[in-house]
């Protein structure tokens, strides 16, 4: 086993190629030891040259909302009705200027309407 420091991305690719050869090695073998050393070197290089910082919570929420927006912006499937909360989210996504207080008031009105229908 000849292992050299990783100095550039070409060295990194060479390490990945070597790692592929020993990846399935059984524990306690020289190949398994080589795999551990390769993984340690690769992790150290990637952490130094390609750091991934903690996610920005606002960006994470924004990405999630964009993913879900297509569901809420599309009409409900035939035969399926949206719940009050889903309806409120549709309003919120399509009009971000609406406030939570307005949504709460809207839900209270819908609850009263449904209680009048039931009762």
Image (spheres, rainbow, N blue to C red):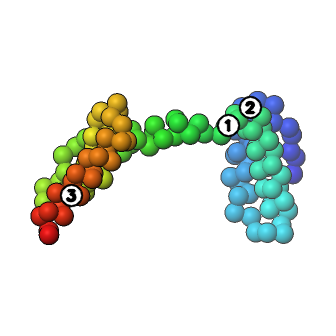
- Write down the residue under mark 1: 53
Q: Earlier in the sequence, mark 3 or mark 1?
A: 1
Tell me what residue is drawn at x 37 percent, y 42 percent: 100
Label number found at residue 112: 3
Q: Is residue 69 visible?
A: no
For the residues labelled 2 and 3, the Cα–Cα distance comes to: 59 Å
Q: Earlier in the sequence, mark 2 or mark 3?
A: 2
Density class for disc 3 (Cα within 10 Å; few <14, some 14-19, many ≥20) is few
Q: Which of the pair 42/73 is nearer the observer?
A: 73
Quadrant assignment for the C terminus: bottom left
Give the label, 3 or 1, closer to the camera: 3
87 versus 54 height, above or below: below
| Numbered label tally | 3
- Write down the residue under mark 2: 49
Residue 114 occupies quadrant:
bottom left
Density class for disc 2 (Cα within 10 Å; few <14, some 14-19, many ≥20) is few
For the residues labelled 3 and 1, the Cα–Cα distance comes to: 47 Å
């Amino acid at each position: 086993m000849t292992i050299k420091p990783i100095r550039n991305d070409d060295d990194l690719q060479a390490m990945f190629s070597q790692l592929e050869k020993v990846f399935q090695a059984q524990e306690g073998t020289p190949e398994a030891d080589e795999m551990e050393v390769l993984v340690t070197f690769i992790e150290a290089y990637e952490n130094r040259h390609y750091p991934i910082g903690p996610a920005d919570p606002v960006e994470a929420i924004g990405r999630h909302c964009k993913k879900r927006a297509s569901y809420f912006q599309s009409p409900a499937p035939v035969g399926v009705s949206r719940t009050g909360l889903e309806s409120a989210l549709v309003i919120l996504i399509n009009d971000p200027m609406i406030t939570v207080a307005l949504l709460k008031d809207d839900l209270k009105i819908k609850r009263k309407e449904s209680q009048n229908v039931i009762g």
